[in-house]
Image (tube, grey):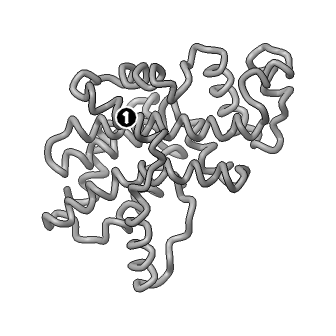
Amino acid sequence: MLFALFCVPDSRGRVQRYHRQYQASAWFVNSQISGKIEISFSASRTALVSPNQILQSLIAEQLVSDPNSARGRLLNEAARLFRDKGYERTTVRDLAAAVGIQSGSLFHHFRTKEEILKAVMVETIRLNTALMQAAADRAGSPRDKLRALIRTELESINGQTGEAMAVLVYEWRSLSESSRAEVLKLRDVYEGLWLSVLEELSGKGQLKADPFIVRRMLTGALSWTVTWYKPERGGLTPDGLTDQVMAMMGL
């Protein structure tokens, strides 16, 4: 589900061709967007040790909205409504009522309802990419980096950004072509983090399967946890679940 915005080819030859095409584009980034993220992190990488510090850094760079601001509250409520009702069935009036303002006041922040949808997706990818990059940077070996990526993605799917992540998956086709292209550029950066670590593991002989296929399998498995994993009920912790995923991969 997560970022499954394309179809996996059905034959080995076609997978190889698609894989090469994907790798060629995976690090193509919008300099205005992802360049800011990289500069923000490279300048104070060791200082940003908590998710809140990372969030505040992105807010300061105006890459994501402050969740306590009017815009941030609107995006949070929009994510919830788009997930629960669907984008098409959610009206501007619904969005305004959810944050306690008049319908016309929404357009102080966004020109159209689609701009709200795109902002939900873009800001979610930016935040989770930054969280994953920081987690991987703090890890040592390629194995530890993979564990950090798995743990962080599980948190993004089942934690605070879960609603927005669901919107990213299910409302993808509600975006216009130009908006979709912008989100794809950010998606490629996100997926590039995974592929670089998986390919490093493969190069060391620690991963036997094709890194591209492994990532697709992890995508489905991790995102599906939202349907059955309930850590608030006790039992398996997020760290414990991460350990199980690593064990399943023989790592």
- Seen at 72% across and 33% down, the residue is 81
Q: Quadrant of residue 251?
A: bottom left
Where is residue 238 drawn, in percent x and y? 35, 36
Which is more toward the observer, 203 or 2?
Answer: 203
Q: Position of residue 225 (x, y in %)?
A: 47, 47
Above-or-below relation of 130 to 209 = above
Please say if 43 is above or below 180: above
Q: Quadrant of residue 98?
A: top right
Residue at 40% x, 42% y is 153
Lateral position of residue 157 relative to residue 50, left or right? right
Quadrant into which the N terminus falls: bottom right
Query: For the point 46% across and 82% down, which residue is it?
Result: 14
Identify which residue is drawn at 41% across, 58% down. Answer: 26
The amino acid on which the numbered mark 1 sits, given as a three-letter code, is Leu
Nearest the eye: 20 or 146 = 20
Q: Is residue 43 left or right of residue 23?
A: left
Rendered position, 248 above or below 231: below
Across the whole image, how many numbered discs are drawn on residues? 1
Q: Quadrant of residue 89?
A: top right
Q: Identify the residue position indicated by label 1 in the image.
A: 131
How crowded pointer 1 is (Cα within 10 Å; few <14, some 14-19, many 20+) is rated as many
